[in-house]
Amino acid sequence: MIKAILIFNNHGKPRLSKFYQPYSEDTQQQIIRETFHLVSKRDENVCNFLEGGLLIGGSDNKLIYRHYATLYFVFCVDSSESELGILDLIQVFVETLDKCFENVCELDLIFHVDKVHNILAEMVMGGMVLETNMNEIVTQIDAQNKLEKSELYLQHLWGSRKEGGRTKTSLLQAGLAGAPARAVSAVKNMNLPEIPRNINIGDISIKVPNLPSFK
Amino acid sequence: MALKMVKGSIDRMFDKNLQDLVRGIRNHKEDEAKYISQCIDEIKQELKQDNIAVKANAVCKLTYLQMLGYDISWAAFNIIEVMSASKFTFKRIGYLAASQSFHEGTDVIMLTTNQIRKDLSSPSQYDTGVALTGLSCFVTPDLARDLANDIMTLMSHTKPYIRKKAVLIMYKVFLKYPESLRPAFPRLKEKLEDPDPGVQSAAVNVICELARRNPKNYLSLAPLFFKLMTSSTNNWVLIKIIKLFGALTPLEPRLGKKLIEPLTNLIHSTSAMSLLYECVNTVIAVLISLSSGMPNHSASIQLCVQKLRILIEDSDQNLKYLGLLAMSKILKTHPKSVQSHKDLILQCLDDKDESIRLRALDLLYGMVSKKNLMEIVKKLMTHVDKAEGTTYRDELLTKIIDICSQSNYQYITNFEWYISILVELTRLEGTRHGHLIAAQMLDVAIRVKAIRKFAVSQMSALLDSAHLLASSTQRNGICEVLYAAAWICGEFSEHLQEPHHTLEAMLRPKVTTLPGHIQAVYVQNVVKLYASILQQKEQAGEAEGAQAVTQLMVDRLPQFVQSADLEVQERASCILQLVKHIQKLQAKDVPVAEEVSALFAGELNPVAPKAQKKVPVPEGLDLDAWINEPLSDSESEDERPRAVFHEEEQRRPKPRPSEADEEELARRREARKQEQANNPFYIKSSPSPQKRYQDAPGVEHIPVVQIDLSVPLKVPGLPMSDQYVKLEEERRHRQKLEKDRRRKKRKEKEKKGKRRHSSLPTESDEDIAPAQQVDIITEEMPENALPSDEDDKDPNDPYRALDIDLDKPLADSEKLPIQKHRNAETSKSPEKDVPVVEKKSKKPKKKEKKHKEKERDKEKKKEKEKKEELSVNAVTAPKDEYEDAKTEARGEEDDAEGQDQDKKSPKHKKKKHKKEKEERIKGKKKSKKQPPGSEEAAGEPVQNGAPEEEQLPPESSYSLLAENSYVKMTCDIRGSLQEDSQVTVAIVLENRSSSILKGMELSVLDSLNARMARPQGSSVHDGVPVPFQLPPGVSNEAQYVFTIQSIVTAQKLKGTLSFIAKNDEGATHEKLDFRLHFSCSSYLITTPCYSDAFAKLLESGDLSMSSVKVDGIRMSFQNLLAKICFHHHFSVVERVDSCASMYSRSIQGHHVCLLVKKGGDSVSVDGKCSDSTLLSSLLEEMKATLAKC
């Protein structure tokens, strides 16, 4: 089970928090702070697993995180999840975000946290992994967006306005370029060239052409 | 005016959306809180609007604020309003907000039930999806109970998108409403073979989560998972399954044997690291469970260790970490294979990554032996000195203590060395684990008698340097050590070299700066010390000396009397008075030493940590009445190894003042420790600013606590414990060459005479004799201690509720509750108490219900009808997965509904178009009932069997066994996959008389081939008791296991049921004879088979063939197949027009393949089977069945 999914930036500002166990708002903030504290002091070239903090349940739990450019993606999971599998899931998540937002960057997450939630909901449900096939996720999200557009004719609640003037730094590109060591390790996990990633999620034949960011 | 208002509201609508809010917060960095509270006020205004779009926008903003830590529970009702919006866009916002902020305590959550139900049955898959997603986050026991049925229906939805979500959420439902597990399980199992990989993966996910907590209930699924494992290509699913097998193998070693080969293949073939890693993990689990009796064992271990070494040596830190993690699992059972990689692990201790260092430390724990303990601890000690950051240093400290104290100090050969290590550890600045060291000191000093003298000398030195400890380390835990030191010096004061000196050290003014509980121990032990000094002096006739000591006490004790700590104050004033009294007596030259030391006479024995719990309750003692305040549960926290019960030392320790105090303090300390451990807000102490010794260039320069002792061979510059390493080496060397002359020479060097060398010459390194007489005193247990291993179980474990036997047939009372109309409830007749699900049993009731309702309330009829249809939808029987893959679930539900309508009396047939479907429907319905073992078949006890309508095949697999005026026996025979050659006979006994039936016994005459499994110790001729009594009109089921040797022919066993029928007139002894018929079909187990595997089987040519033909069959082919499936436990592999291939498997593993063809009135059955006799018996049985059609 996944206990919580947190995204925060290099300064510990939360960008998304999803708890699959009930906590009070104060505890949630404390967990975010503590997790940030644990994760942020780690070097770039150490392992991506952390024995869980004190707040988020017990010895069975682990923090598994990845650091992309300005953002930390942290999954808190228990022992029933495969560590390397979750690492890949984070990668799928980020790549999905990248597809949905077209070169995702922190600003996208800041202004469209609801959309990020919706994307996440197609991947993880109630703490269990629902879908790992990026194509499938994107298809569902697109269909929902279409439905939404047909519904909304008057209000433009959903950000047709642009965040003016800022240049976007893509998380994926910056993440990989910024940390070459990490990229190497990620690629090794994925066992290129035979299988695009170490979890060969879903159908291989659909999967392969699906990784534009790694070309 | 009105226009202006409208305009205003539209303005507000555009006033601020989520993006504006975020931007605003970013622009108000200085006064963020103020800005947000302003925004919340605006949001409150927006929520008051009637426009749902405005409300949704407001809720969307609230969700964002929730992430920033603002409580939004006040808006719960508004969130529900938005959830019930008709537009998906708003609905999604509402559900997202709910999933982020609702929890079990949210009181309005019960208002959502109907809304969610409506959304679940919405025609739009995204409405349903969003409701499922939301529900997964805030499901409560009430919601789970009310919606379980709706969700179960969705598990067979046409859209895989909904199916997978419904399957996943079932896990949450099970957790909150465990009663739903059994009724839902058959369908969940079915989903394991869903054509959609996403749904399949979800089902695997859920079952893995369930099985992880209660693996034994899922053993029966092992074959299915095994098949999935060998056929699946989805790594995600594979990993889950492999992890599941890891949990199952400890319970079923045979499974492990089967697994080894495919797993080894996967290890060799896979290129995915994650899969490789999980395979290795499970192989390890298998090996652990097999730990004996596997010849090619070592090859597998070698493979694992070798693969793990590759991982550990990898430059990727993640793999290194995982490699170490898995290695520690191997270590537990096969320490030898890991020990050869000691170099690698020690190397990891130097890794820059703390996670990796910690993992390496874990490994060290299991790698120690008597031989290398000192060496490893020495290495760790150097790490302690080098370590940065208190967390890691504390971890090292606990590890050192763990390693040394493990399994009752098994690996320690020299306790002097260990004491010196502990003393060295006290030099650690800023550690939180002073109490740990103290506990070790106390434990060793008490339990190893031979070490007491040495321990006392070390402790007195510690006390002497107390000023150092007290001044700099008061705030952190190391001063706890003084607690142990003071107590040891006091308790074992007879070993002190210079008791007077120690006494003075303990009475220093500095002592008063120590924490209260330590001072209290000081005060108490000062008296013990005083008593022993007094005795010495008096025996030596030094009256002045004795008086001088008394004077010292009288002078110094007042400083404790002034203590702010109650405990210290009380003890000190008490003792001061005592000493003053002694002083008076001394002045009169009265000898007092005897009396004073009598205060502390008696031996202390260690008590096992769980001793208190194990005291049996004496008869007549009311434990519910409080005598004192309840004790805390801290004992269970204690991880000290449990001692073996020791006969000689069973007497309870005498309560003595000092001990009571000890216990009190220890308990408090324990409680504090536990509180810290349980308190999520407790944050470890931050790194100490000063690290005194860190700057020192090397280990050699660490200032050693000045100890003036009889320690021999003081190598200048070396820390104490290192001397022991050298000494120990020498000692072992000497032991080996006992006859050598050099031994004598060295012994001379060794000035310390007290060392007791084992005189046994030992050649083997493993049997190194300890230097001390290691008489570890076993801890005391109370008399008649209750043996119990229940200590570790947590009664509050939420997963315990899910420990449910899933193979038992489903009882009526277990069916999921179905939402019923209120009217129906008011017209409830007694038999309707049970929620009705089964169609058969429902039929008459439904009529009744309908009828009453009609009379009662005609207006509500339409609505009611709708409800009932819904409930019928919900109970659609589990479908045959092979057929229904293509069929649309929606359509089927309609069918079911139609069918139901059809079954009702004609006046209720309203929808005419349904009638047309009738024929088709019936065929379908029957086919749906195919899978035996599903809730439908198994859960249908015969007593519910109302007369059948002609068209329907009998549903019950229970057949009549025997009956008389008292009792009716029906039975069902099922094979079990777990046990070869065993079948379970479920006998339902129904009391038809007005008497109570009791003392029922079943005696069966065994044949050579079939034997009943009886309780151990009972003979073949004894009856087996039926485990219940039957009041009039009640029926119940008993299960018996039979072992069958050969299953190729059918056979019959004679048996008798004897019982006592008791009514008002009296009791009579009665008997009922019966014949158990084990048909060959009852040895078959419905096993699904894919057509490709089926084809392969037929091609293999290993099967013998036979066929039968039956004429004059009027039944439709569909029904025919259903009959064969139901009665003979087959499953349909493939069906083309009026021709079908079927498959089944016997409990002994015979494959049976059938080709059933229908042409006109005749049906031919061609069979292939690995045993020809079995096949012909089966075909005969089938012929009989078909002839009845």
Image (cartoon, rainbow, N blue to C red):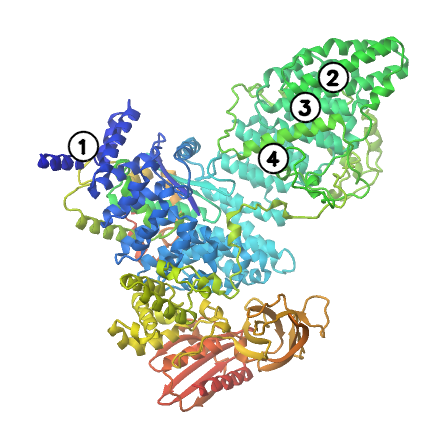
Q: Provide the residue designation for mark 1.
A: A165
In this orientation, which residue lies closer to the viewer: B1008 or A64? Answer: B1008
Chain letter for mark 1, please: A
**Is residue A144 in view from this perspective?**
yes
Task: Tell me what residue is drawn at x 57 percent, y 76 percent.
Answer: B968
Q: Secondary structure at mark 2?
A: helix
Q: Provide the residue designation for mark 2.
A: B574
> Local crowd at mark 1 within 10 Å, few (<14), some, or many (≥20)?
few
Q: Are marks 2 and 3 on the same chain?
A: yes
B224 is higher (above) or lower (below) than B773: below
Tag nearer the camera, 1 or 3: 3
Chain letter for mark 2, please: B
Q: Provide the residue designation for mark 4.
A: B399
Question: Upstream in the sequence, badge 2 or badge 4?
Answer: 4
Amino acid type at circle 2 is: Cys
Amino acid type at circle 4 is: Lys
Chain letter for mark 3, please: B
Task: Tell me what residue is drawn at x 38 percent, y 44 percent.
Answer: A186
Amino acid type at circle 1 is: Gly
* Residue B124: percent from left, percent from top: 25, 56
Q: Are marks 2 and 1 on the same chain?
A: no
- Image quadrant where residue B434 sits: top right
- Disc ID at residue B1013: none
Gap in angstroms between the C-alphas marked 2 and 4: 42 Å
Q: Are marks 4 and 1 on the same chain?
A: no
Q: Secondary structure at mark 1?
A: loop
Gap in angstroms between the C-alphas marked 4 and 3: 22 Å
Chain letter for mark 4, please: B
Gap in angstroms between the C-alphas marked 2 and 1: 81 Å
